[in-house]
Image (cartoon, helix red, strand yellow):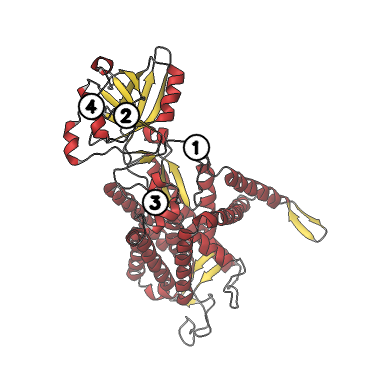
């Protein structure tokens, strides 16, 4: 059961990024009040002011009774020097704009009852339009009419936002702190095990007494990755059913992980426990209180999981706990297993992000489709296009397998709908397993400077920085493992090679459980667990 849960969650944890959108703000006011609404425009076609103060204010004329495909029946005096709002109709937008500017309008707003898609036209029409053109929701215009009546003054502006949003720094901080803490925790557990004289569990389950699960067989690693691929494909075809199963599993797994993390903190700071018995059950007051807190947090997240304004905080908290507990629980027994697992997952990540769009009907990669959900059409729009729903949409279910931080420097985007910077749990867990192995190896060789652990964490940081740099330059989400795996594997190999410890680093330790078909890792005739005079 534990292995199945692992496959289900880990197979869906990879990076996605924010989209380059073209939203702007419609500022409507009168003498006593003002409000702002979301509009969509094409900055390369009809640019508008970057700030509210720089924008020119115009009175708004209501012509929603027409689609303005021609100027018949409309007096130029009605539109001259004013902004005008018309309905979306059968003719194209450039035709409406040409008619509007011939009649003297200064700005054209097109109200739509359907999704707002970035305005476009045939190439020859772009040069003919000289006035700002934008799309707005028809329901927003009706609301504005109720608030302001007929005396509306409007300004259009598009606040600039930096691609290097502060949310990226928050995501980077979350990832590096989680990887570092997870690796440190794994090393601390290994040190406690060695100090207690525990040499690991036996039997076919390959579990230590502490509950850790060791991956030691290359065949099992291959089967594990194959199951991940199968799970991702199943999610692609049966998303609407399986998403609820994943949500339920995440609630259980994250509550358990959060309990494990908080209990370890309580133990570290010396928080005592009050033990008592009920019939044959031995209970702890601390465990009961922690269980209640963790279950409550998971339940609150499950109930309000689609409330974007604040629920991301709980999702990130549960996600950090899940990743930490995963890195502490799942142990890679040697560097050979690390190389096999990380290399296979690198191929997996690249294939499902870059290759699968050639096989899907809508040209969206399976990884993006599964991570964002089939109903997130606006979020998946590529390049310089954006799609905003014209009517309030029922919240669609999203997989809880990403860290999410809202963009801080995108007021127009957040007015149209919250935008997030996203990092998949897999981009923390997968390199984190190697970091955890390096931390344990430092314990085995009694490295006081923790050279393997520190160097691998630094390599992870550099890999993440490169990932975000490429994402910002290309304007596309990147498979982070494409950069993280080479950085961490090569750095670890170089450190082991320079220290002359590659053989030990590659083979791992001797307390791991081996297949009966494999030879012991110690040289023939050796019965201790020392390497060149140092305890391993």
**Residue furthest toward the bottom?**
525
Q: Which residue is mark 3?
A: 16
Picture coordinates of residue 394, whole percent (x, y):
51, 41
Instruction: List the residue tagged with mark 1.
Output: 309
Q: CA distance from mark 3 to mark 4?
A: 42 Å
How many labels sit on residues?
4
- Say which residue label 2 marks: 67
Q: Is residue 205 left or right of residue 12?
A: right
Q: CA distance from mark 3 to mark 2?
A: 39 Å
Q: Is residue 368 visible?
A: yes
Local SS, label 4: helix
Mark in front: 3 vs 2: 2
* Eye-nearest disc, 1 or 4: 4
Residues at marks 1 and 2, CA–CA distance in whole angstroms = 36 Å
- Left or right: 398 as drawn, with respect to 75: right
Residue named by callout 4: 99
Q: Secondary structure at mark 1?
A: loop
Q: Earlier in the sequence, mark 1 or mark 4?
A: 4
Expressed as whole percent of the image width and height from the top left, the position of residue 154 reads 34, 20
Q: How many residues crowd around disc 3 within 10 Å: few (fewer than 14), some, or many (20 or more)?
A: many
Residue pushed farthest right?
Answer: 279
The answer to whether residue 47 of the structure is visible from this angle is no
The residue lying furthest to the front in this view is 73
Mark 3 or mark 2: whose residue is earlier in sequence: 3
Between disc 3 and disc 1, whose residue precedes?
3
Q: From mark 4 to mark 2, how far is it between C-alphas?
A: 11 Å
């Amino acid at each position: 059961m534990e292995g199945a849960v692992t496959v289900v969650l880990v197979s869906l944890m990879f990076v996605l990024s924010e989209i380059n959108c073209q939203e702007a703000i419609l500022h409507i006011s009168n003498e006593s009040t003002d409000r702002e609404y979301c509009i969509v425009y094409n900055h390369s076609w009809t640019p508008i002011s970057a700030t509210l103060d720089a924008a020119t204010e115009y009175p708004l004329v209501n012509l929603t009774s027409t689609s303005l495909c021609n100027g018949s029946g409309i007096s130029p005096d009605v539109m001259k020097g004013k902004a005008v709002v018309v309905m979306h109709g059968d003719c194209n937008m450039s035709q409406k704009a040409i008619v509007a500017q011939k009649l003297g309008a200064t700005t054209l707003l097109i109200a739509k009852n359907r999704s707002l898609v970035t305005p476009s036209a045939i190439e020859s029409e772009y040069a003919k339009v000289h006035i700002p053109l934008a799309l707005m929701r028809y329901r927003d215009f009706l609301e504005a009419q109720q608030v302001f009546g007929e005396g509306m003054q409007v300004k259009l502006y598009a606040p600039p936002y930096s691609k290097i949003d502060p949310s990226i720094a928050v995501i980077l901080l979350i990832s590096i702190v989680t990887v570092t803490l997870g690796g440190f925790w794994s090393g601390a557990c290994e040190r406690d095990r060695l100090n207690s004289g525990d040499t690991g569990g036996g039997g076919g389950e390959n579990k230590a007494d502490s509950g850790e699960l060791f991956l030691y067989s290359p065949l099992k690693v291959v089967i594990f990755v194959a199951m991940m691929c199968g799970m991702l494909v199943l999610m692609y075809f049966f998303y609407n059913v399986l998403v609820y199963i994943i949500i339920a599993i995440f609630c259980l797994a994250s509550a358990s992980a959060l309990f494990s993390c908080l209990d370890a903190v309580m133990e570290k700071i010396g928080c005592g426990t009050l033990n008592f018995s009920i019939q044959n059950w031995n209970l702890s007051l601390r465990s009961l209180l922690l269980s209640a807190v963790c279950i409550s947090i998971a339940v609150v997240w499950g109930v309000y999981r689609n409330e974007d304004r604040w629920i991301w905080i709980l999702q990130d908290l549960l996600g950090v706990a899940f990743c930490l507990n995963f890195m502490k629980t799942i142990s890679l027994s040697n560097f050979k297993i690390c190389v096999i697992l990380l290399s296979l997952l690198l191929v997996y990540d690249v294939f499902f992000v870059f290759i699968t769009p050639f096989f899907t009907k809508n040209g969206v990669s399976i990884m993006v489709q599964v991570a964002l959900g089939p109903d997130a059409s606006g979020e998946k729009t590529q390049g310089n296009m954006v799609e905003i729903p014209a009517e309030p949409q029922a919240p669609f279910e999203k997989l809880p397998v990403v860290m999410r931080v809202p963009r801080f420097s995108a007021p127009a985007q957040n007015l149209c709908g919250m935008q997030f910077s996203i990092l998949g749990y897999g981009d923390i867990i997968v390199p984190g397993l190697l970091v955890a192995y390096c931390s344990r190896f430092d314990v085995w060789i009694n490295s006081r400077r923790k050279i393997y652990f520190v160097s691998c964490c630094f390599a992870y940081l550099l890999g993440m920085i490169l990932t975000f740099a490429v994402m910002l330059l290309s304007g596309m989400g990147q498979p982070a493992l494409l950069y993280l795996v080479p950085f961490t594997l090569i750095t670890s190999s170089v450190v082991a090679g320079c220290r002359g410890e590659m053989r030990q680093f590659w083979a791992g330790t001797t307390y791991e459980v081996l297949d009966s078909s494999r030879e012991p890792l110690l040289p023939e005739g050796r019965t201790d667990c020392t390497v060149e005079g140092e305890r391993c």
